[in-house]
Structure formats: structure tokens, C-alpha cells
Amino acid sequence: MYIYEKEVIEKDEDKIPSMYDRGFVLTRKGEGVMQKIQSLRVSIKDFSLSSENRRVLRKNPNLGFEVLNLPLLDYDWNIHAMGKTFYSQKFGKNTMSANKIKDIVKNKKTSFNTILKFNTEARTVGYCICFLKDKILHYAYPFYDTEYISMGLGIGMMTKTIEYAKDENMEYVYLGSVYKRESLYKLQFKGEEWFFEDKWNTDIPALKNVLRDKT
């Protein structure tokens, strides 16, 4: 259970960006289902690459991606196969099913409207299911080839996406929930804010202390 979990349904895409500003995020629970949670976002006007971000990008020198609209008309079964394997190995076998991934990517009534397809040289190595509207991007469900789990690809994909948002003059990239120690890896970008006590806060050291105390 998230700290501020409150559920609403909003199917009007034009209204969804303002819901994100109020602390809600889209979920995989159904079309337009949003929850108010303790979440993290990057204010793009305050973002620039740090030395650590640059180090991550140097480890992934050939990483690029395509921005594709959902639902995908030309669906590839390797998408849900890769996702199922990734979530099973990283978070447990019941975390995200192949059918759920396929449904999100192919279903016209999904809450999400974009998928990022990551490539290195000629090989597809990962994806991220996203919501993209106006000046915001929700980096929601990333997954990648498990051969790269120990090679920094996951944080490389996230960094590339935030860099892209900067190039596209977006306002915010939302990075999902921050309520466990495992979320600490997200806290390495300039311009981060976290939703707490019904407002956005910039005290990231305080958030780090909170997460370090979590199990």
C-alpha cells in the first residue's frame, strides 16, 4: 500500500497532466485508473547531466531509442516475453504477467499511449511503457534484456529518457513511486521533487533518509 493511496478514474487525456501535478499517476489497473502516491518527478528546467549521469551514458555509448505510439499495430511477441522474464527475475514471478504487458501495449483502451523501444547498435535491448501528453512524460514500466542486468542498462535507459525530455522542452518526467529502499537508485538526477503531505518537495536528502529506513 502506498503512503497516500487514493484511487480515481480519469479518461480524458487532456485532464491527466493536471492530475499528475496533484500527485496522481496512471496505473495498469484499467483505463484511466489513477492513484495518488508518494512519487518522484524531475523538473526538466532544473535538470542537467551530472558527472554520475555522464558516467552512466559512457557505459551505454550506443544506446538509443524510438518513440512509438500505443496501441502497437505491428506487435512483436518478444515484447511481452522480454518483459515477463525481466519482471520475474528482478521482482518475482507474479509481478507482471506476459498477458498484462501484451494487453497494455495492444489494447486501444489502455491508460498508456507511448512505448520507448531501446536499441544498441542493431539489437533491441529494452522497452518502457509510458504516458506522454503535452509537456509531461511518465516513465512507467521499463524492462530490458536480462543479459544486461549487471551492466547499468536500466539507469542508462532512464537517463537517456530524461535527456530526451530536456531536448524536447518538456516540463516534467515522472519516475513512479518512491517508498522503499529499492527506490534509492532513482535519486541521482538534478531537479528532482517528491510528492509528500499533498505537495511537491525538493528536499531529496530527507527522502533518502526516509528510504534508507525502509525495508
Image: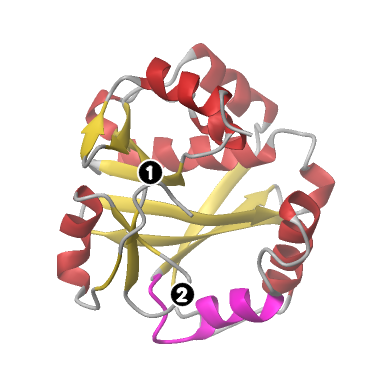
| Residue 13: assigned label | none
Single out the residue that lies furthest toward the right. 147
Residue 10 falls in which quadrant of the image? bottom left
How many residues crowd mark 1 within 10 Å: few (<14), some (14–19), many (20+)?
many
Question: Which residue is at 78% across, 64% downward?
Answer: 93
Q: Is residue 104 left or right of residue 102?
A: left
- 168 or 171, nearer to the observer: 171
Confirm whether the magenta stretch covers residue 139: no
**N-term mark: 1 or 2:** 2
The location of residue 139, given as percent across then percent down, is: 45, 51
Q: Is residue 116 left or right of residue 195?
A: right
Asked if the residue under mark 2 is in contact with the one under mark 1, i.e. CB atoms within 8 Å, the reply is no
Question: Which residue is at 57% across, 42% downward?
Answer: 157
The location of residue 65, given as percent across then percent down, is: 54, 52
- 97 or 162, nearer to the observer: 97
Confirm whether the magenta stretch covers residue 104: yes
Magenta segment main secondary structure: helix
The location of residue 144, given as percent across then percent down, is: 69, 53
In the rendered image, which residue does mark 2 sit on? 29
In the rendered image, which residue does mark 1 sit on? 39
State the SS at label 2.
Answer: loop
Spatial separation of the CA atoms under disc 1 and disc 2: 17 Å
Q: Quadrant of the C terminus?
A: top right
Question: Callout 1, which amino acid?
Answer: Ser
Residue 8 position (above or below residue 155): below
Residue 199 position (above or below residue 107): above
Colour convention of the picture: secondary structure
- The residue segment tinted magenta is 98-112
Residue 103 falls in which quadrant of the image? bottom right
Question: Which residue is at 74% across, 64% downward?
Answer: 82
How many residues crowd mark 2 within 10 Å: few (<14), some (14–19), many (20+)?
few
State the SS at label 1.
Answer: strand
